[in-house]
Amino acid sequence: KNQVEQSPQSLIILEGKNCTLQCNYTVSPFSNLRWYKQDTGRGPVSLTIMTFSENTKSNGRYTATLDADTKQSSLHITASQLSDSASYICVVAPRDYKLSFGAGTTVTVRA
Amino acid sequence: NAGVTQTPKFRILKIGQSMTLQCTQDMNHNYMYWYRQDPGMGLKLIYYSVGAGITDKGEVPNGYNVSRSTTEDFPLRLELAAPSQTSVYFCASSYAPGLAYEQYFGPGTRLTVT
């Protein structure tokens, strides 16, 4: 069964600090992976997409990495802002397009 | 451009009641999806549609029905509501399946069945 595990479940950081979220998956064969940001009470919004051949991709202060060999991805948030407080969801697609969603990591940024 | 809209935002149902969750997209996407999101769990696909008149079951279809008479609308019907259907429901749409094309999500409907 295809699975996506995210860690930590939640974290609290001070404004201006960096943090890294982890995503481990068992999806195979692997097609691509997206990180979504979900603000409280809203639907998820895509931050970045990575294909199996990409190692790193940035979107402003968000940088995603992918190691397709170890089936791991990470999302690094640099110089966190209060608006980064949200749930971050890792989604993986095998070649048959049946998406697997992680449970998400809840990030709380405190002033 | 409104994107994906859902109504209602909140609803409380009694056990055994029925309701329809509305979803509309204005991006002319052929693919539309209904998900449910339970606390501490990843989104689960209930039903999806690849175009007007074509729908198919996802992972957790029991207790739900859908229809797709137009490209824009994809309502989700709950018959005989049960407490297990208490959840947040998201509708999404995309140009194509998989992750190569982004799925755009609506704001969600928070449903409580008591």
Image (cartoon, coloured by chain):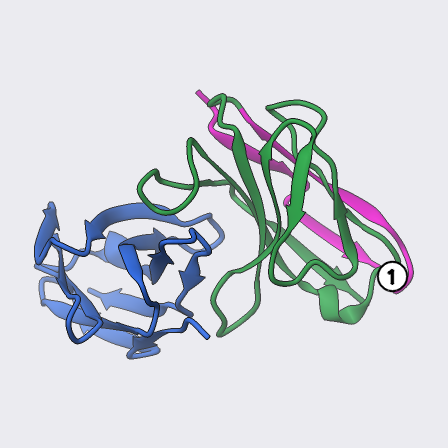
Chain colours: A blue, B green
Q: What's the residue at 10%, 49% (across, down)?
A: A58
In the rendering, at what x and y percent does residue A93 appear?
36, 56
Q: Amino acid at mark 1?
A: Lys
Main secondary-structure element of the magenta-colored stretch:
strand
| Depth check, front residue: A96 or B93 | A96
The furthest residue to the bottom = A8
Please indicate whether residue A96 sits to the left or right of residue A21 in the image: right
**A23 sits left or right of B87 in the view:** left
Q: Secondary structure at mark 1?
A: loop
On whether residue A66 falls in the magenta region, the answer is no
| Magenta residues, start to end | B1-25
The residue positioned 66% from the left and 40% from the top of the image is B55
> At 65% from the left edge and 28% from the top edge, which residue is drawn?
B73
Residue B8 part of the magenta segment: yes
- Check the image and report above or below for B93 versus B40: above
The x, y position of residue B62, in whole percent, is 75, 61
In this view, A56 is above or below A13 = above
Residue closer to the observer: A82 or A19: A19
Q: Is residue A60 left or right of residue B25?
A: left
- Count of numbered circles on the image: 1
Relative to B51, is A42 on the left or the right?
Answer: left
Where residue B94 sits in the image (x, y, percent)? 44, 35
Quadrant of the image containing the C terminus of chain B: bottom right
Q: From what the image shows, is residue B94 above or below residue B86?
A: above
> Which residue, given by chain and number where applicable, does mark 1 sit on?
B14
* Label 1 chain ID: B
